[in-house]
Amino acid sequence: MLNLSARVGSLVLKNPIILASGTCGYGEAYKDFYAPQRLGAVVTKGISLKPRAGNPPPRIYETPAGMLNSIGLENIGLKKFVSEKLPWLIRHRVQVVVNIFGEQEDEYVELAKRLDGEPGIAGLELNLSCPNVQKGGIEFGRDRAAVESITSRVKAVSRLPVWVKLSANRCDPVVLAQAAASAGADAVVLGNTLRGMAVELDKKRPALASVTGGLSGPALKPVALAAVHDTVCAVKIPVVACGGVFSGRDALEFLLVGARAVEVGTAALVNPLAPMTMVEEIKNYLTGLKVKSLDEWVGSLNRNG
């Protein structure tokens, strides 16, 4: 029998497929299609200390190789998440990783501190793609010092595993991943959306109200694959892949270059059953090769050709 369990630091997942933040609500979005506890884990949409209304519409636009979104981190805030959403996840025994974000470092620390004592949370994912209002709006995830500082401060107040989500947008993800690792991160997640834009030609206006947004979907896969490959070679902590995963074969490629698990987002928006289909595709492919466990496959890329 094939053992599909995946280990990301101290977390053991029943399989390597994870629902990515921002694409599955608070973990219950696909409950009418399958039980989310059948997946390795679920990452909630980003949670802030206070509720956020997000950006005005239109804030989603389809592109030939993916999707642009500018949701603006809309969420119900920490208090309602804990009282209204977390109990359902606990009852259904979902492996939950909570994505958190803020506009200043102290907000990340406060969120981590307040979530540390809550039951049913398997880990935290730090979304560092937010603008730091105390430093002129530069994204936390573009500043090595900020990545190191937030990670170390969160680790100091939380006993939960901490994953640091990084982007390959405008910085070398290896350098940022090394900063996260040196600060005690339990894993890094690569990557996040890439900045993009679309226009409505006949109307002569931007397709999104915010003008630019984050590009996700198949277009990201080569960029994310390179970032994961390079980072696996550069850090000793686990790497979780994210970006352009639309099939079990896509997931297998990320695992082959060394990712410990794979987050799936846009594919589930196109087809809610896609994550479960990927689990079956991975199982069938590895069984066909007579692989006994996922560990045999992870990182087994033949770099010599």
Image (tube, helix red, strand yellow):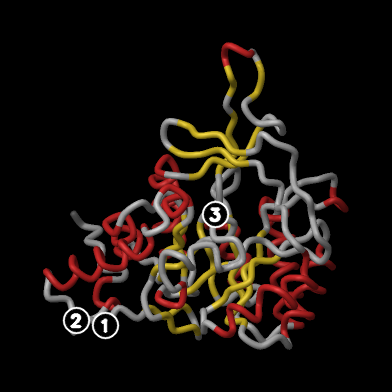
When the figure is inspected, residue 7 is found, relative to residue 137, above or below; the finding is below
Q: CA distance from mark 2 to mark 1?
A: 6 Å
Q: CA distance from mark 1 to mark 3?
A: 31 Å
Query: Nearest the camera: 174 or 271?
Result: 271
**Which residue is depicted at the point 59% across and 56% down?**
22
Inspect the image, locate mark 2, and give the three-letter code of the amino acid beneath it. Lys
Q: Quadrant of the N terminus?
A: bottom left
Mark sitting earlier along the chain (3/2): 3
Mark sitting earlier along the chain (1/3): 1
Q: Secondary structure at mark 1?
A: loop
Report whether 17 appears left or right of 199.
Answer: left
Q: Report if the CB atoms under discs 2 and 1 are less than 8 Å apart.
A: yes
Counting from the top left corner in percent of width and height, residue 153 is at 76, 75
Badge number at residue 173? 3
Mark sitting earlier along the chain (2/1): 1
When the figure is inspected, residue 295 is found, relative to residue 61, above or below; the finding is below
Q: Which residue is mark 2?
A: 292
Counting from the top left corner in percent of width and height, residue 289 is at 12, 70
Badge number at residue 41? none
Query: Nearest the camera: 87 or 170?
Result: 87
Specify the quadrant of the image occupied by residue 61.
Answer: top right
Q: Which residue is mark 1?
A: 3
When the figure is inspected, residue 187 is found, relative to residue 204, above or below; the finding is below
**Which residue is depicted at the point 75% across and 48% down?**
54
Q: Which residue is at the far front?
A: 32
Q: Secondary structure at mark 3?
A: helix
Counting from the top left corner in percent of width and height, residue 180 is at 62, 67
Counting from the top left corner in percent of width and height, residue 211 is at 68, 29
Report whether 83 appears left or right of 245.
Answer: right
Specify the quadrant of the image occupied by residue 210.
Answer: top right
Q: Nearer the viewer, mark 3 or mark 2?
A: 2
